[in-house]
């Protein structure tokens, strides 16, 4: 693990070689892009020590890391250059991370979002997921866990964009899912915004019509390390129903099967 010289409260104590840390710091200070950069990560946190530790750690592992101390700074960065994933602290002075997440999700659909919350703040995690976050992590954290979660989210996003089962188009309620193009289009031809995880869910239903899928099976199909009692599937189903169901309060196409999970009924009957 990596430890900041100031031991930030949001990062659990860790250790790494002096040479590795010095190398990462040199790369960061010169603004150089690391060799074979894997992705560009935006770190949004009002604590300087947390930003420094994560920036050095991501650069050390081959990523391009950019830091922002506020929501306004983050908005300016993503408007000027492409970013693959944003790591956003929820509790920041001024505009908070939830408001920033809403802004990023509405304008940059393909941008992956990982929310950082305080331990035990379940409400924050739920609201973040409802806004379209792809994952969350709680403080204090180990940088290795942050890296592992970021890798997992980036894999899912990459897989979703590849649309690896061809050019299949499937009608789901009042929308059509174009799996090859990774697009959801409504009856008027307008594109409906969806997150990579929402695409994964729709793809899972499209591949298993008229089959009851348990929450655990849905989680496995999405290739994510989930908690078996993770309720984020329910939250995402709720969001999807608002997009594809003519009447989300009385869903016909993605239905709940008591004690079994969810089922996609193509004809809605």
Image (spheres, helix red, strand yellow):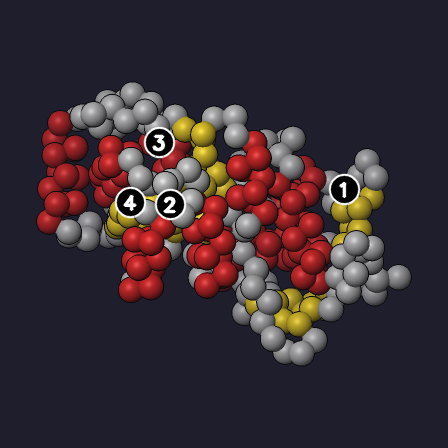
Give percent across and percent down for residue 65: 26, 48
- Which numbered marker is on residue 144? 3
- Occupied quadrant, residue 202: bottom right
Give percent across and percent down for residue 205: 70, 55
Which label's residue is closer to the chain start, 1 or 2? 2
Q: CA distance from mark 1 to mark 4?
A: 41 Å
Q: Secondary structure at mark 3?
A: helix
**Which numbered disc, 1 or 4, marks the residue closer to the eye?**
4
- Occupied quadrant, residue 164: bottom right
Q: Secondary structure at mark 4?
A: loop
Q: Which residue is mark 4?
A: 69
Q: Are marks 1 and 2 in contact (CB under 8 Å)?
A: no
Q: Secondary structure at mark 1?
A: strand
With respect to residue 201, does 137 lie above or below? above
Picture residue at 79% right of the left edge, 54% below the top: 249
Give percent across and percent down for residue 165: 59, 63
Q: Which residue is mark 1?
A: 261
**Left or right placement of residue 26 versus residue 155 in this view:** left
């Amino acid at each position: 693990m990596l430890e900041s010289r100031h031991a930030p409260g949001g990062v659990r104590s860790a250790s790494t070689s002096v040479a590795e840390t010095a190398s990462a710091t040199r790369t960061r200070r010169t603004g150089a892009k690391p060799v074979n950069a894997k992705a560009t990560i935006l770190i949004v946190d009002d604590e300087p020590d947390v930003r420094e530790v994560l920036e050095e750690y991501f650069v050390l592992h081959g990523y391009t890391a950019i830091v922002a101390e506020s929501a306004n700074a983050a908005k300016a960065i993503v408007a000027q250059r492409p970013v693959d994933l944003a790591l956003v602290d929820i509790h920041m002075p001024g505009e908070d991370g939830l408001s920033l997440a809403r802004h990023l999700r509405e304008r940059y659909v393909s941008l992956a979002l990982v929310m950082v919350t305080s331990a035990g703040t379940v409400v924050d995690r739920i609201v973040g997921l409802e806004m379209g976050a792809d994952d969350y992590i709680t403080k204090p954290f180990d940088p290795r866990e942050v890296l592992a979660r970021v890798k997992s989210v980036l894999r899912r996003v990459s897989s979703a964009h590849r649309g690896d089962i061809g050019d299949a188009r499937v009608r789901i309620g009042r929308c059509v899912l174009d799996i090859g193009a990774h697009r959801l289009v409504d009856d008027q031809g307008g594109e409906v915004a969806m997150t990579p995880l929402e695409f994964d869910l729709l793809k899972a239903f499209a591949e298993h019509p008229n089959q009851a899928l348990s929450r655990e099976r849905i989680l496995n199909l999405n290739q994510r390390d989930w908690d078996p009692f993770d309720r984020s599937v329910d939250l995402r189903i709720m969001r999807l129903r608002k997009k594809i169901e003519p009447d989300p309060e009385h869903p016909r196409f993605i239905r709940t099967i008591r004690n079994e999970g969810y089922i996609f009924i193509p004809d809605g009957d």
